[in-house]
Amino acid sequence: MLGTLEDGKVKRRSLDMEVTTVRVPVRVGHMGIITVETKAEVDIEEVKRTLRDFRSFPQHHNLPTAPKAPIILREEEDRPQPAKDLGVDDMAVYVGRIRYSGRALRLIALGNNLVRGAAGITVLTLEVMREMGLA
C-alpha cells in the first residue's frame, strides 16, 4: 500500500500522513488511528473495496505464513476490537470505522503485536527474502 515492487526494490509512494496510536489495556494488539488528507474527493466504497481486495507479494507467491487476505475489513460501527477480532487470523490487519469528510479519510487499524508485529512478521520477511533469492 505504501509502495510498489520495481526491479526487486520497493519504490515508496509519496504520501503525507499523520498517524496516531492509542495504547489500551489489552493483553495483545496495537491499534492505530489513521487520518489521510486527500487532494481530491474519494469514493469511500472504492476505498473499502481496495482495502478488502488488497494482495501483495506474499499472497501472490502463496507464502506459508502469509494471510490469505492481509487486510480484513470490519464494517461494524464498533470494530475492530482486540478482544473480538484478534485470534482469528493474527497475521492479518483488521481495519474499520472508516469515515470520510472534508477530504479527510479516517480509519482504525488493529494488528496482533506479538504475531504479526514480532515473530510472525520476521518469519514472513524471511520467506519473502527466500522467494526473492535474497536469503
Image (cartoon, grey):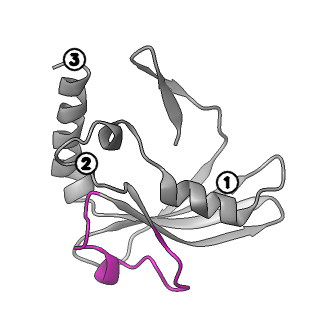
Instruction: Determine whether 2 is above or below 107 in the image.
Output: above
Would residue 25 be visible to someone looking at this image? no
Which residue is located at x 64 percent, y 65 percent?
Answer: 106
Across and down, in percent, residue 37 comes to 74, 53
Q: CA distance from mark 1 to mark 3?
A: 34 Å
Across and down, in percent, residue 73 comes to 48, 68
Across and down, in percent, residue 49 comes to 59, 60
Region rendered in magenta? 73-91
- The quarter holding residue 107 reads bottom right
For disc 3, the marked residue is: 134
Which residue is located at x 52 percent, y 33 percent?
Answer: 3
Q: CA distance from mark 2 to mark 1?
A: 27 Å
Q: Which mark is residue 66?
A: 2
Which residue is located at x 67 percent, y 59 percent?
Answer: 46
Amino acid tagged 1: Val
Instruction: Determine whether 37 is above or below 26 in the image.
Output: above
For disc 1, the marked residue is: 36
Of 58 and 26, nearer the camera is 58
List the single residue furthest toward the top.
7
